[in-house]
Image (cartoon, helix red, strand yellow):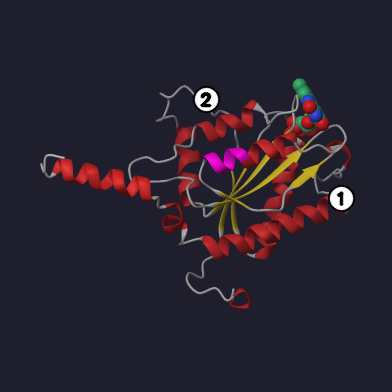
Amino acid sequence: MAALGIEGSYHPPRILVLYGSLRDISYSRKLALEVERVLSAFGAEVRLFDPHGLPVFDRSSDDHPKVQELRQASIWSEGHVWISPEQHGSMTAAFKNQIDWLPLSDGAVRPTQGRTVAVMEVSGGSQSFNAVNQLRILGRWMRMVVIPNQSSVAKAWQEFDDEGRMKPSAFRDRVVDVCEELFRFTLLLRERGDALTDRYSEAKQRRLQGALTKGLGV
Ligand SMILES: Cc1cc2nc3c(=O)[nH]c(=O)nc-3n(C[C@H](O)[C@H](O)[C@H](O)COP(=O)(O)O)c2cc1C
């Protein structure tokens, strides 16, 4: 951290990794596990969320244990990695469902706002960027800082060995680049998230509500 000129907390950056597939042989899951290994080697504390059992978003199952687990993991995190397969030129429903369960704010608690996020995709065909482009927009909507670098692993079925490790390749080098960039951005931006997401229009709204509750007749 000293090399980056960063002062402040010294705990390992806390990174939540989300992936978007429920099938047994899932390359987005294999990539998520590789990302976990790489980020851990950089010194991060990493949690991987297993999307199995998460209900379909219905705006009412907030007490479901998987919903609670996902929200707690995001509140704990200082940065995310989002990895979706590309299906029909889009991110998967299994991926989007996870983000739909994360509220932008729940009272004073903001599970995603101000955090960093790196976006990645796996695909079966030749290299494509449809899912990462959508994830980038989704990160903006969740008021996160989407880092510039990203990874798209084409023909993902030929990029992992029998142990599930990613084979040496330009794709893997890129994954390490993205993890390194996320690690640095997270060190720089954590603890500044509240200041960075504080908006004039919302502060104005809060002042207005405060005046109303004090009975100033606004
Ligand atoms: C219904 C369906 C649609 C797909 N559409 C695309 C696509 O648009 N572009 C592409 O490159 N691969 C496409 N694929 C291939 C997947 O991206 C690939 O199988 C990927 O590994 C799936 O993620 P998973 O291994 O984590 O389950 C599609 C696969 C399925 C089953």
Res. 87 in view: yes
Measuring from the top left, give residue 73's x and y in whole percent.
50, 46
Say left or right for 132 vs 168.
left
Measuring from the top left, give residue 186's x and y in whole percent.
57, 60
**Which quadrant: the C terminus?**
top left
Quarter location, residue 154 = top right
The one nearer the camera, 135 or 94, is 135
Give SS at disc 2: loop
State the residue lying farthest toward the front. Answer: 218
Residue at image coords 85%, 36%: 157
Q: Residue under label 2, please give it.
A: 55
Q: What residue type is labelled 2?
A: Pro
Give SS at disc 1: loop
**Which quadrant: the N terminus?**
bottom right
Note whether 114 is above or below 187 in the view shown: above
Q: In terms of image quarters, where does ligand 1 lie?
A: top right
Q: Residue under label 1, please give it.
A: 167
The one nearer the camera, 172 or 184, is 184
Q: Give the range drawn in magenta.
A: 137-141
Q: Which mark is residue 69?
A: none
Q: Which amino acid does label 1 sit on?
A: Lys
Measuring from the top left, give residue 117's x and y in whole percent.
60, 49
